[in-house]
Amino acid sequence: MNELQFLTWVRGPGLDAAVAIFLLGTVWRLIEIYGLGRKKDLAAPRLTPGASGWHTIVRRSVPPEGMFKQSPVTYVGGYVFHIGLAAIVFLFAPHIKLVEGLVGLSWPGLPSQIVDLVSVVTLAAMVVVLVDRIKRPVKRFLSGFEDWFTWAVTFLPVLTGWLAVQHLLLPYTTMLALHILSVEVLLVTLPFTKLFHAFTVFGSRWYNGTVNGHKGVPV
Amino acid sequence: MSATLEKGVRVLKEVIDAPIASYFNSCVHCGLCAEACLFYTETGDPKYTPIHKLEPLRRVYEQEYTWLGRLAKAVGLAKPVTDAELHEWQELVYNSCTLCGRCSVVCPVGNDIVYMVRKLREGMSASGNAPDGIKGAANRTVTIGSPMGVKLPAVKAQMKHVEEDYGIPIPLDAEGAEYMVMLSSMEIINFPEYLGAIAKIMRQAGKTWTLCSTAFEATNAGMQIGNSDLARVIVSRIVDGAERLKVKCVISPECGHAYTALRWEGANLIGRPFTFQVKHIIEVLGEFQEQGLLKTEGMETDRLTFHDPCQLARRGGVIQQQRRLMKQIAADFVEMPDAGFMNWCCGGGGGASAIEEGEELRLEAFKKKKSQLEAVKPDRLVTACANCRIVLEEGLEHYQMDIPVIGLTETIAEHIPDSVDKEGA
Amino acid sequence: MRANRILDTLAGQGITRRAFLKYCATLASLMALPPSAGKAFADALAKAPRPSVIWLPFQECTGCTEAITRSHSPSIEGMLFDMISLDYQETLMAAAGHQAEAALHEAIQRNMGKYLLIVDGSVPLGLDGAYSCIAGRSNLETLKEVAAGAAAIVAMGSCAAYGGLPKANPNPTGAVAVSDVIKDKPIINIPGCPPIPVVMTGVLAHFLTFGGLPELDRLGRPKAFYGETIHDRCYRRPFYDQGKFAKTFDDEGARKGWCLFELGCKGPVTYNACASVKWNDGTSWPVESGHGCLGCSEPDFWDAGGFYKALSMPARPLKLEPAAIAAGVVAGAAIAASSRSRKSAAKAAHETTTLADLEK
């Protein structure tokens, strides 16, 4: 198999399989999790403005009072790489084209130099959070194989994408194919690891906000 | 698997629900919950990271309620929860967790960690892995009626003293009263001025109220130990008493977890909504203040600060009332850093203060409160939880800090003039 | 005539030494060789005897031959035919039938081990090669026989180099590349559909001057011409970087000459010299004329997901997804039902905890 055939495979059967596993896993896992249900809260609710699941979904994106200074690296690093990932995934023209190819939706993108810069910053932020995970006792204590593995499968698509655009290390065709392959690995991994927080974060924040909102506590 | 372990795991299977599943799947091991936990911040030991305290619960969830976990269990790749492990976790689930809920409000993915600790305690207690100290308290509450072994005659004696001291009758079992006032044993034994304060406040507000001979004790060691069956036994007494006396509202005393047990868990424990309201005394005072039924004279002139009980503020939603009340009677009211919603626990909530072997850790964790206090250097410390009060006093004594701790209700009552005519007579 | 020196032949056609030197310098620069190589080319080519070349066409469309023969004269490409002694080329030769076969065998005999073999078209292996026969013999047989005496083989065009269009899915004739059949001779691939004519002359000049093959890449292509992608040398590249893309072939962007990536241009993954050499004596090239690169110098470009699909788009429509979602629902519903029944069972088996139960 030469580079172009490899590329065509990852764009064809590979993509098909990866997206299928991703969808299968996501649907299965969401039903598995939320199908467990919960009991109705019988205590008389106390309604307070700002205390609801929806409020918490939004509010929890901001560090609570006094927390930022406890771990600025976690917050800054987290913000930068999450926003960076979102910008790269959704605002790079070829990626928009992919979404258009899959579901027919399209929107304006960013110039590639800007995406390039965002990629470098995102990669740097991910390295910083990795170093923080290694150095900070709590994070290292909590970390197991899955934590290192999911870091890698998130980092590689950004790295290979950037290397491909920059024409570094390997011929563009090969690097592009590796990039797409790495994204496919990410798609396959996502529903079955902590990366699934990309979905459950909304459910978790909502539950937390709802349970506490019932008490009139805007968490 | 021993019978007790089997029972514990079965109880965990009962309590695991969609929120817990969602929480475990959301955790990214960012460690921020540790930064919110005073047992970690004051010891620096990562094992006190809140999410880590839930490891046994997480594994039961995975192995019982997910395909991959069940597969791993079937092929022997999953690590089963053992009795020895649960025993080891006792320190993490009880001694080093006061159910203060700070972790739950900082988690960036929104995990309600304290919700899960509360559920894990169900399995811990059912499998016999609860600490002896809380077991003793639960035992006394269920068999005698109060964690400190207080019985009705002791309450009656206290009532008599208060009636003599304040010259106000203390109603007992008065049917149809608006308020049924609950006490905590701490208040019966250590802080009798609370009952007198209530009498003065109610007289001024012109409200009818009563104590209940079958339900005077508000604390619920069953909830602290984390056992719904026992908590239900205890809370049912109050429900029965309140319904027998046909009161409109039951007032939880200055006690944090009693409020949570009655206000938020009670209806869920008995499986039906209450026919009466439940309010914390601070909420009631706040209402009286708003309605102009709380008139005070004079101000405290020394520097006062307020320690928010976790179950009242962060876990109960009563945050502004105590501040408005403080301002009514204190000329020099200062706030500690992180006061209010993000206040740090005294270190002894959630039953932790009943655990003897946890004392050293508790005092270590108290350094957080110490630094908060050092930041504002108050002359006295006001709070609204008898348990906080005891734990604060112990900590302050240990660190040789001379700051008296007082209850907000009694402090307010001291400013209510004795000569006020009875209203609505 | 065949032993004539190249320069003599050129002079006979009215090409001056000055024009010849300029030609050599141009070739050297195209091949990214130092300026001194131009002189070396000139010296060597002037003295070199015109080599014998045998050109075998197999499963092909004659496009490659057309591309080379249609070049303007006196162009660089046109000089190809002046540099060589083309002893067998079915399309161009006057001879036919047995005469042609005789010419082929005579050329093989006379220049055994020295001649250059150019192949265009793929070799069909299906039905024992019956899909393409000349003089009653399959292309496979002919190739094996002629290759045996060749000094080197040039696989001209994507069919000879990679199998090309005949090999496109589902490859009914079992077409393969020359390199799939011949393993013991040096092979240069000059892919393209058709290839750029000057690449052919450049390779030939290199062969004559330095007596060997130029440096080749992993796909057997001369690096001098196939070292960079179309995208990298494309004059529309700045628009790609700015995120300015033509969305259709007749929109504002297309008129302004914006990047054709979204219209399926394969420039980013195609290695060829079109963007710098251009076609028809430097007149234009596909992207300049408003159409995206098809990627014709890459293996299996016919099957690379469609000419008008952007590279980042799926190469083929996704098929498994509806089944995957259905399977997800089934798996999820099954585990949810199982979990709920386990939970109910645990509840049913609940033994009310008494004080005694707090102990182990």
Image: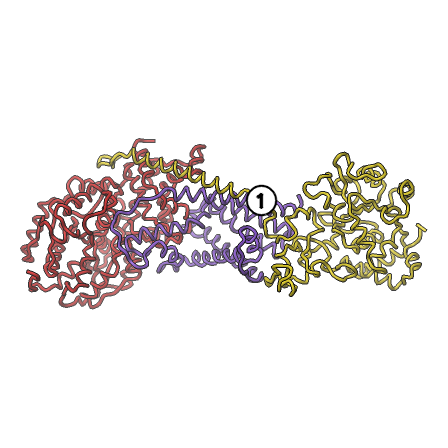
Q: Position of residue A199 (x, y in %)?
A: 44, 49
Residue C1 location in percent, x, y? Answer: 95, 51
Dot 1 lies on which element?
Answer: helix
Taking depth in this image into account, of A127 and C241 the one nearest to the observer is C241
Q: Which residue lies furthest to the top in this view?
A: B2
Q: In which quarter of the image is the C terminus of chain C?
A: top left
Q: Can residue A137 be seen in this view?
A: no
Q: Which residue was labeled with disc 1? A: A14
* Chain C display color: yellow
Q: Left or right? Give the position of A58 relative to B309.
A: right
**Residue plotted at (58% across, 44% down):** A14
Q: Which of A200 and B57 is in front in this view?
A: A200
Q: Where is residue C344 in the image (x, y as percent from the top left)?
A: 32, 36
| Chain shaded purple | A
Q: Give percent across and percent down for residue B129.
A: 29, 38
Callout 1 amino acid: Gly
Q: Which residue is drawn at 42% across and 39% down?
A: C333
| Residue extending furthest toward the front | C250
In this rendering, position of residue B50 left or right of residue C238: left
Q: Tell me, what hue is chain B?
A: red
- Chain bearing tag 1 is A
Q: Is residue B55 left or right of residue C295?
A: left
